[in-house]
Image (cartoon, rainbow, N blue to C red):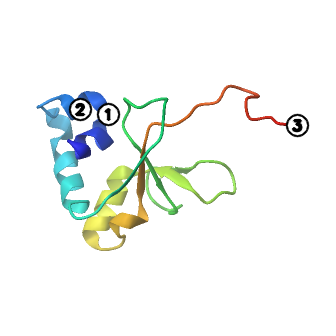
Amino acid sequence: GLARLLLFGSAGAISDRVPPSQTQLLVKFLNAFENICAVYIGGPDKMDEPATLIHGFEDLEGAEEIAPGTKIYKGGINAAIDGIMSGKYNPLDFRFFVGRHEYKDGELNIA
């Protein structure tokens, strides 16, 4: 359940079937994160979507910096899984965030 929620969102978590094209990803994910996985619940927006993977590795294939100069990156789940399985990374080098709070333009302006 949790692995499917993180990878495929709420529709994947409640379904008994994983699309054949995603079965290998799910199996690799379970092997990489079988003992420990850091998951944070955000919201209230986008709670039904796949989790966002956050980390500090700029060279991780598929990752992009969330804002210029922050050195905080999102994405790159396939490379993260491969890196954990090869011993390059630790599962706790990565954080999964389910949901987020979205703000409209100007909502955070306090001046």
The residue tagged 2 is: 12
Q: Quadrant of residue 60?
A: bottom left
Which kind of residue does numbered mark 2 sit on? Gly
The quadrant of the picture occupied by the C terminus is top right
If you read the primary sequence from the N terminus, does the residue marked by circle 3 or circle 2 appear first? 2
Label 1, label 2: how far apart the Cα atoms are: 6 Å
Circle 1 sits in a helix, a strand or a loop, which is it? loop
Q: Nearer the viewer, mark 3 or mark 1?
A: 3
Q: Is residue 85 left or right of residue 23?
A: right
For the point 21% across and 39% down, the residue is 22
The quadrant of the picture occupied by the N terminus is top left
> In front: 54, or 69?
54
**Place of residue 33 in the rendered image (x, y in percent of width and height, measured from the top left):** 26, 60
Label 3, label 2: how far apart the Cα atoms are: 42 Å
If you read the primary sequence from the N terminus, does the residue marked by circle 3 or circle 1 appear first? 1
Tag shown at residue 111: 3
For the point 73% across and 29% down, the residue is 107
Q: Quadrant of residue 6?
A: top left
Circle 3 sits in a helix, a strand or a loop, which is it? loop
For the point 55% across and 34% down, the residue is 101
Instruction: Give the class, few, some or many, for how many residues have Cα within 10 Å of label 2's Cα (few <14, many ≥20).
Output: many
Judged from this view, the residue extending furthest toward the right is: 111
The residue tagged 1 is: 9
Q: Nearer the viewer, mark 3 or mark 2?
A: 3
Q: Are marks 3 and 2 in contact (CB under 8 Å)?
A: no
Q: Is residue 73 left or right of residue 85?
A: right
**Place of residue 76 in the rendered image (x, y in percent of width and height, measured from the top left):** 41, 51
